[in-house]
Structure formats: structure tokens, C-alpha cells
Amino acid sequence: MKNRTKVVVIGGGIAGCSTLYHLTKEGWSDVVLVERDELTSGTTWHSAAQVTNFGMNQTMVGLKSHSIALYKKLRDDPEYPVGYHHGDGGIRLANTEEQMQGYRHFASMARGMGVEFEVIDAEECARRHPLISTENLLGGLWDGEDGDIDPAQLCQALAYHARKAGAEVYRNTAVTGLRQHKDDTWTVETTNGNIDCDIVVNACGYRVNEVGAMMGVHHPVASMEHQYFVTEDIDGIVQAGHRMPLLRCPISDYYSRQEKNGLLVGFYEQDCKPWGMDGISSSFSNDLCPDDLERVMDVLEGAFARMPVLADVGIKRVVNGPITYTIDGAPLVGPIPGKRNAFCIIGLRAGLGEGGGHGWLLAQQIVHGEACYDTWCLDPRRFTGHANVELTSLKAIEDYQNEFRFHFPHEHRPAGRPAKTTPLTPILAAKGAEFTVVNGWERVDYFKPSPDFHPRHTFDFDESFDVIAKEVELVQTKVGLTEVNGFNRIEITGADRHSFLDRMMCGRVQKRDGRVGLGYLLNHHGMIKAEATVANIPASDRGPDRVWYGSAAASEYHDMDWLTSHVQDDEDVQFKSLTNDQTILVLAGPRARDVLSKAARGDWSKAAFPWLSVRECFIGFAPATVMAVSFSGELAYEIHVPNSALYAAYLALTDAAVEHELGLFGARAVESMRMEKGFLHWKSDLITEFDPFETGLDRFVKMDKPDFIGKAALENRIRKGVQKRLVSLELDCDHAPAYGGASLMQGGDVVGTITSGAWGYRVGKNLAYAFIDPKLSEIGTCVKLNLLGQLVAATVCAPSLYDPNFELLR
Ligand SMILES: Cc1cc2nc3c(=O)[nH]c(=O)nc-3n(C[C@H](O)[C@H](O)[C@H](O)COP(=O)(O)OP(=O)(O)OC[C@H]3O[C@@H](n4cnc5c(N)ncnc54)[C@H](O)[C@@H]3O)c2cc1C
């Protein structure tokens, strides 16, 4: 066994084997995999091993396409062939029009990744899968690439090719300890001796937290027992003359695929069972949980009704094994929060279908710092302080119970809520707030007109359309108040804070006391990494000279990691997160200045406190820091208040506003208004796949600065010219907004992809943003949007349709 290597991958299931293989493909051959038992002795060996191309976003579709292409290559490799039934096809069923709508959206989205799904009716479903009944069925989504693979052969083949490229695999070698050194390198302690390395990767399946604990972290991953059975031969299959497609049934929560001449049928029962919550026996290896078919009786009945043949056929084998889940169902693939040189590829619940792609994206991140797709939907840092073991388990149960029922737009399921609240949450709830969830925070979405107001789950505009219209009107004509909790705020102190930020950001950094600036951080490839406001607060009894770095709520761990990992040894810079200590009250509308002037002493006139100013003050007697910034495009103030004084500040503002007809508004109104202004959202419109010029942020880039992170790469990109361009679009459609991922078409070709969409109430238009072929980015150019299966006209329009000269917010 080596005692020094570059990377140690811990765990020899599909996650570890795929990572090892792809590290060698990315050019790193001095890499090692350690496995406590034999390869595939965790969950992988007993997997149903279905491989599908379906994903809820383009990154998932893209990585699954990579799996499929890789598995085909391995199948056809004469040296080490792998058993892979590719192209049996698969159907996701639907019994509601809303589900069908969702499938039409997913088909539009997948087309942009070169993947063709078909939305088919019930008769066509039954024609393609002759064993199913069309009772209570509307249709389904057909994925022609679906199939299944031999999981053990797959892992052995990946390990074989990795070894051939120089990697080493140590079986029967358990990791027992992890020690990190001052230079961020690691010593991996194993039952067969120590290995020093630069980077560790946790790929330990359901034992993820045993290894997590060795480095002092808890990963939000929980295991569930999951069960399938395999039937005796079925005559109908033999007679069909073709292999049965895969089937996924959100109506009765089961799936099936062909296994020899019978079926493998797996269940997602409501009466489901978490596993390993209080520790896992060290001898549980190559093992299963006891059969428990009683538990799946509730879904068995539906499965029998859909596939009557199941009632007449014997069961040959039952498999019940642990499967891992995270808080949102997607795995955690990427850097481990708060750690250096440590990555994970964990929480895989469809690891065979996805594993090829996850290992590929992880290896790219390890070797190049970033992957070819934006990987935020997989990033372990997307969950923060709330992601504890109990909450993860509740979300795992909920997700398991809804395995094939995708989330509708604006749908936030109830388990694990409310995770993060402020003193105002119950007050706003009593006023009728409907909440959305942002990084665990309960954030006001809109105010319900009556307690029993429950809009449908649909991709169309729903019943909240007019409610949001009223909130926008309030902000446009009078004054509104909303709470923005969880906003990421990092206090940066130290003499070098500005020179540090100057290196981190690609544009001019605002350095003047009392002023606020907006800027962008690039990665080393010159692509958009983060967006932040920089507010300079002079020394006071509340602290020394300091910068408040503000960014999206979800970026709490992400941005802190990025900033702290770039501090140089001789730099005087300190960071303190205020994210959980302060909340923003946003006062917006033409009367906002009047209300603020009444609530807080001082001169708040345009001359004394212009747009992009920051000042400490008291709202009533509540200490506050006010910034003149606006995401709505109206005159607005962000009032940052410590949570302990939040209610006091709220009372002071509402008291001061009595004569100004202050009302409350929520995030959906803001979403509409920011689209009318051309303002962008991190991880919807601002992603690592595009540089600042492609994203239309030219005015925020100063190429004449001596240096900044990403500058050299950006210079190269400038030489090549923009590949895509972000544009605003006006859609010729008034029944549904555009959704991220939907494809823009010209003729039969995909020419662009939607990033955001919302109705613009103040301009009376259905608006969207999209990255599009630069040739089509001129204002007035018309293309077609595949919106829920229909082609609607989409015309490029000005980026800021409402108040284009930015006069109102000044
Ligand atoms: C019944 C069932 C059916 C499924 N069907 C499908 C399906 O149809 N399609 C699909 O895509 N997915 C399916 N899955 C899920 C899929 O099998 C898993 O997502 C996948 O196998 C997880 O792989 P992994 O590598 O993350 O974990 P594992 O396979 O569990 O591998 C982790 C490895 O880490 C090793 N390890 C742990 N601790 C240590 C240590 N301290 N030192 C060294 N090594 C260690 C373990 O021994 C193990 O080999 C199914 C799962 C179940 C339970």
C-alpha cells in the first residue's frame, strides 16, 4: 500500500469507483481508493440498477446522459464488458393534467441538453408497456434511453480502467481516522496503515457520517429501508417479443423493470422506515435488512391494479436494503462545507443511474475547481445550520413517500418546517403570510386574502396572480413592508479588507465610507461565482470600520468558503457571519422616505441619504443599519436589524406609517418587480456556465484593474467572443410563466435556455430571461419558446422595461 498519494477516495461503491475512474480521466493517476470490504459491499451490490435520463434540471439531465454514454462504452468494451440493457425505454405515468404539464416542461428542458423525451397518452403508454392497464391514467413521459445495468460489473470495470491508468484500489482496508495538517493535507488512517494525501473524498454510502465524524462534520444524509421483489417468469413478457420498458408510477408509488423473463418491482410505501439512525453494526456489509412485505401493502394494491399480471405470478426473491436521502432528494457532490481539500459524493438515492455523471462532475471540481455544468443543485453547501440529523430524517421520509411526485412551482412540502424563523414569523403568519422556504428560512411569499386560500399546484399562473398584483400596486403607488430573512451577511474587518475585495471582485470596489456598491466575483475560469453588495460602515460604538458583504440567503456557506479560502497569509482581513443575527425589513414605494423619516431621527432627504448610501441609526429605539438600495425598482430602503430588536423595529415602522397606508408584501411581488428591472438572481441567472460579458454585466467588469481572480481566463474568453448572451424576453402568452430550463427554438433547433420567468404587473407583460445564441440577442428578435409543450412567440426586449433610467429608486 502506498503511504503518499494525491487523492484518497473512501468507499468502493458506484460513487467511489466512478470518482476514481474520472480522476484518472481528468489526468490524475496518483490516486487511491480504499474500501473496508470488497467493492460494492454497501448499497450498490443489491441495487435494482435502473439507469434513466430523467432529471428535474439541466445539470441532472446532462450528468445522466454522461452516465448512459459511459455505460454504453463500457458495455461495448471487449476487454471488460459490462451487462447493460440500454434503450428498453421507460415511462413515468400521470393521472392529472398538472403532472402532464410538468412532463411537458421537463421535455422542453431536456431538449436543451440534446435529450428527447416524449409526452404520450394513456393508450400509447399501454402500447409500449403491454402489461399495464389504462384505468385512471392520462399518459406519461417516455424516455427512450432508459435501461438497467449490472452494478457489480460496472464498478469492477470502472476500477479496472482506473487501475490501468495508474490508480490503486485497496480492498479490505477500512478508514478509521482522518487527520488534517496545518498545510491542509491529510493523513488517512486505515486498518492497514496510514496514507498521507492532499485531498480526501467521502464516498461511504450509508456510512457517510461515520467517516464524516472522523473529520468533525455531520452530513445531512439519512438512510431509509427500500424494498423490491423479483417475480417468476411472466408469459406476457415472453409473448411481447421485446423487453419491457421501465415504469415509474407516482399514482401508486412503485417502479418496475424487466428481470430475466419476470419483473423487478420496487415500492415507496407511505409507512416507510428510516434505517441506521442510532448507528450501524460494523458487521453490516454485503447485507440486507429483513424482508418486510407487510410494510408495502398500501402501495401493492395500486401496483396490482396497474399491472394485473402481478396478482397471478409468484415472487422469487425479496430485497430490502438501505438507501440514502438528503434534505431535498438530490445528492451532495462537491466540497465539504467549512473544510479544505475535502470533498464528498454522498446521499445518492439513484446512484447507478446518476453515479457515472456524479463522479465525472466531482472529478472535474477536484482537478479544475469547477465542473462543466453549474453544480449548485448538488453542492453540499446548499444546506446550512438547520441541516441536522432529525430534520434530515424528516425530509428523507417525506421525499421517500413522494419519490415520483415532482415538486410543482412554489410547492414547499411541510416536513421539517419551520426550520429557521425570526421573531416576526408568527406575527406575519397571523397577518395571513404564505411562506416560501429559502435555505430553511420561512420567507413571506405573499399575503393570503383569506385563511382558506390555497392555490392549486400547477405550472399555469395560479389563483395568487391577482393577490400578487395588489401587492405590486401597493409598492408602486404607496408603500409596502416586507421581511427578508436569512440574507447572507458577512462582516469583513481589517486594514486589508478593500484590497482583498478588490482582488476577489472583477469590477471597481466601493471603498467610500457610507456608500454601497454591487459587484461580482469570478472563479478561476472567469465565470460568475458570486454576486455581492459591499456596504462600507464607518467605525462607531457598534464596531470598527467594516464592510458588510451581502449576498443571497442560499450562499451563506458557499461565499464564506470562497472568501476565506483566498485570504493570503500576510493579509489583515477577518470575517464574521451575521446571517443568523440580523434580518432585513424592506420599505419600498414612493412614500418609503416619508415613513423612514418619521420612524428614525436624522435627515433622510435625497441629498443627505441618496441611492446607494448606508447609515447606522435607530428605528424608534431599535438599532438598525439602513441601506438605500432597491430590488423592486421603486424608492426603497433595506433596514438591517438585529433579531432581538426586530419586532421593536417592525412596530416603530408600522406606527410611523399609519397615515401613509403602509401594507405588507412578499417575495413573489419582488420576483415580478425585479424581472421588470432586469435584476438577476444568483443561481438562476448568475451561474458558473457563463462569464460576466455573456451575462450582460459588462459595466461591472474593469479589465484595466491590475489583477483579479479570473482575469487571465476572462482575457482568453474575450478573445474567443461570447458564446451565449443573457436577454430579456416578452412572451406572447398570458396563462403561464416561463420556467428555468425551458428551450427557445428556431426552426427545429434549440437556440437558448430560460433562466427565470414571471409576470411583470407594472408593465403588463409576461417576462423571462434566457441565455441565447448571440446572433439572436438584438432587441426585437423573435424566437419561439417551448412553454409546457406549446410554441409561443418570445421577443427580445429591453432589459429594464420599467423605469429604464432608474429615476424612481433614486
Ligand atoms: C433496494 C434498492 C434499489 C435501488 N435501485 C436503484 C435503481 O434502480 N437505480 C439507481 O440508480 N439506484 C438505485 N438504488 C440506489 C443505489 O443503489 C445507490 O444510490 C448506490 O448504490 C449508492 O452507492 P454509493 O457508492 O454511494 O454507496 P455504497 O454502495 O453503499 O458504497 C459505499 C462503500 O463505502 C464503503 N465504506 C463505508 N465506510 C468505509 C470506511 N470507513 N472505510 C472504507 N470504506 C468504507 C462501504 O463498504 C461501501 O462499499 C437502489 C437502492 C436500493 C437500496
Image (cartoon, helix red, strand yellow):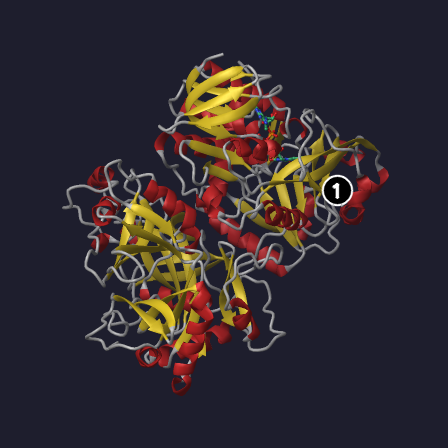
- Return the residue at label 1: 131
The vertical placement of 221 against 232, above or below, is: below
Residue 553, placed above or below residue 126: below
Q: Quadrant of residue 25?
A: top left
Quick one: which residue is furthest to the bottom in this view?
Answer: 659
- The amino acid on which the numbered mark 1 sits, given as a three-letter code, is Leu
Residue drawn at 15 percent across, 45 percent down: 705
- Across and down, in percent, residue 623 comes to 36, 68
Residue furthest toward the front? 541
Task: Give the camera-side residue of 775 and 461.
Answer: 461
Q: Nearer the viewer, residue 139 or 442?
A: 442
- Is disc 1's CB within 8 Å of ligand 1? no
Measured as percent of width and height from the top left, residue 359 is found at: 48, 31
Measured as percent of width and height from the top left, residue 793 is found at 40, 62
For mark 1, give the secondary structure. loop
The answer to whether any part of residue 733 appears in the image is no
Ligand 1 shows up in the quarter that is top right
Q: Is residue 19 visible?
A: yes
- Residue found at x 47% / y 71%: 647
